[in-house]
Amino acid sequence: MRVLPASAGRVAGVIAGLLAGILAAGAIAWPAMAAPECDVPAYLLTTESRLDKVAAAVERERRLDVLVVGTGSSSLPGAGEAAKAYPARLELALRNRLPGVAVRVTAEILSRTAAEAMAPRLPALLATHKPDLAIWQTGTTDAIRAVDPEDFRDAVDDGVAAIRQTGADVLLINPQYSPRLETMISLTPYLDRMRMVTQQHDVLLFDRFAIMRHWSESGAFDLFGPVKGLEMAHAVHDCLGRALAIFLLDAARIDPTSLRIKQ
Amino acid sequence: MSQLPATDSPAAPVAAGTVPPQLAPRAAAPVAARELRLDLFRGLALWLIFIDHLPPNLLTWATIRNYGFSDATEIFIFISGYTAAFVYGRVLSSQGFVVAGARILKRVWQIYVAHIFLFTIYLAEISYVGASFQNPLYAEEMGILDFFRHPDVTIVQALLLKFRPVNMDVLPLYIVLMLGLPPMLWLMVRRADLTLMLSVALYALAWEFEWNLPAYPDGTWFFNPFAWQLLFVFGAWCALGGAARMAPLLRSPVTMALCVAYLVFAFAVTLTWHFPQIGHLLPRTLAQWMYPISKTDLDVLRFAHFLALAAIVVRLLPRGWPGLTSPWLRPLVLCGQHSLEIFCLGVFLAFAGHFLLVEFSGGAVLHALISVAGVAIMSAAAALFSWYKKATSRNGSRSKSAAGADADMTGGG
């Protein structure tokens, strides 16, 4: 029973995110975000895992260094688009919420790189940037290439272990929801494996897939259509960046209002 | 086929010497008349597979995978094993191993051609997407088109069944299972229990040593044939007498209670997938022991779930249940009787439905409409196939033996 020992702890919504469908997303939605156009249900931004390093850096040192390591979907195609992609939007959202804290979000984009090739590069990247929090976005390339899901799990596992060894907090981001391509790319096994690894290591998973599917079903964004312009991509990344900021601060148990009072 | 008279299965005219005589009655006796329940549930499985292949919608909630561990694939493979053993078992006993083997290989070829046909449709779809869909949000995901920069390699890998697009994994599994059928059937009519034990052993070995077939460009088959053969062989075992021998066990109230308890447990677990908010109610140790529930390797939990479901269905719907001949269930039965054709049609309709949804950025209404229309088209096609078979068999071509006609008509599994 090779796969059983690998099973991570409480896998409550393991396949949840994948099967949840219209019911969970449509019927039970709690508005959690300020901007009405891209609400995220609260349960998608709730976690029991903690970001202790982030909390310590913000509260004691008044600074926060975040490193985003990801593939193409952590950026937008074109020159000068970096400022519109979610890492930059996350930085902006964090700065707005954490006045007086020096927030820096750096993005390292390794396009079309599978987890197995990315994991070994993490230690060097972490040594260079020395972040408090490392955000690792992965899975899409593996799904496109149909990498063996168990090999993928091992690679993610190695990567998470490598980050934790440096003492940084870890947050994983799973693939995007792309309804137009779902008959061509089978994401389910990779989404499952990422959830398993995050539960095993008790680290955060930002469920980008479920969040974007929620937006698609609630009508916030038409992710089906052949949109050629960048406007919608900008809006989606902006919403992702803000949702990510809320998720992070909640997991770090940082209450922005208390920071303001201390100032 | 319902229209086939029960007298189509005379086990008596066994050519002496082709099969040990004591085996012949065993091979044919268990099911004298056509088992309409098999057709009904295979038809149901085909409908559910079609609905599951569409993007999630309201009807998706009617499919069984949302209420337990197993899904339509288990039903399909089990019934395929059952009917294949039933049909070719009779050919084996009446015409010998060589003819039965040749018939099975002919069937394998048909399934293979059907698979390649579906692959061609997939090629057309992905080429269309490549030309028309350019959302910069999905620049990375469009890497899927890279395969078609080298169509020579990709197409050859598809012909070798190593490159299989999403949702096109069932037929390759079916091909491999059918390829293994001749020797399996040969042994099954002689030593049924031994065959089943060998199948269990292969399943266990596949888990222990992680056996699976390789896929392109990476990884392994989504449906591991070494694991899924268990369900196919179990179906064959049931067809060749196993079901009759299990009947007393199935009548026991203890068995029923266990089955109901397990189904309730599985339902409770799936609830935590749909409502992550109640996930904390699931004990951590249980989750650790249970997850992941592998579909690729036909997890024991899935197999057990299928068994429990089957036991209860067999108990609730006896063979002579009058509803089986009701006109309301007729479309399901007809679909089940032309499984290969309807399966392929279903995959095609899922592609087409997906395309319509995208092109017209359809809402829930169009979505439901597409699902219902798809099921209606599948039923109409099945009715047409039945009519055609009936018409051609009436107009002569009676030179074919009754058993032979039967084998082709049932779709041979």
Image (spheres, coloured by chain):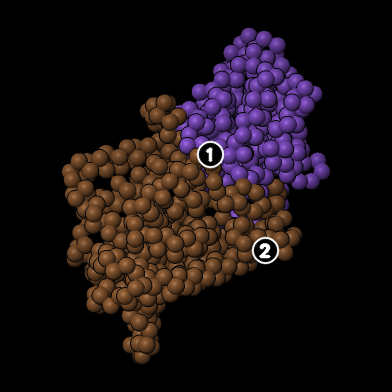
Vertical placement of A81 versus B323: above or below? above
Vertical placement of A256 versus A184: above or below? above
Q: Quadrant of residue B76?
A: bottom left
Q: Mark 1 or 2, which is nearer the eye?
A: 2
Badge 2 marks a residue whose secondary structure is: helix
Identify the hue of chain B.
brown
Residue identified by numbered label 1: A192
Vertical placement of B64 versus B81: above or below? above
Vertical placement of B155 versus B193: above or below? below
Identify the hue of chain A.
purple
Q: Chain of mark 2?
A: B
Which one is in front, B315 or B408? B408
Does residue B66 show up?
A: no
What residue appears at the point 75 percent right and 37 percent down from the top-left corner? A109
With A183 as the anchor, is B278 left or right in this view?
left
Q: Quadrant of residue A161?
A: top right
Q: Quadrant of residue A149?
A: top right
Badge 1 marks a residue whose secondary structure is: helix
Badge 2 amino acid: Val
Badge 1 amino acid: Asp
Q: Which mark is residue B156?
A: 2
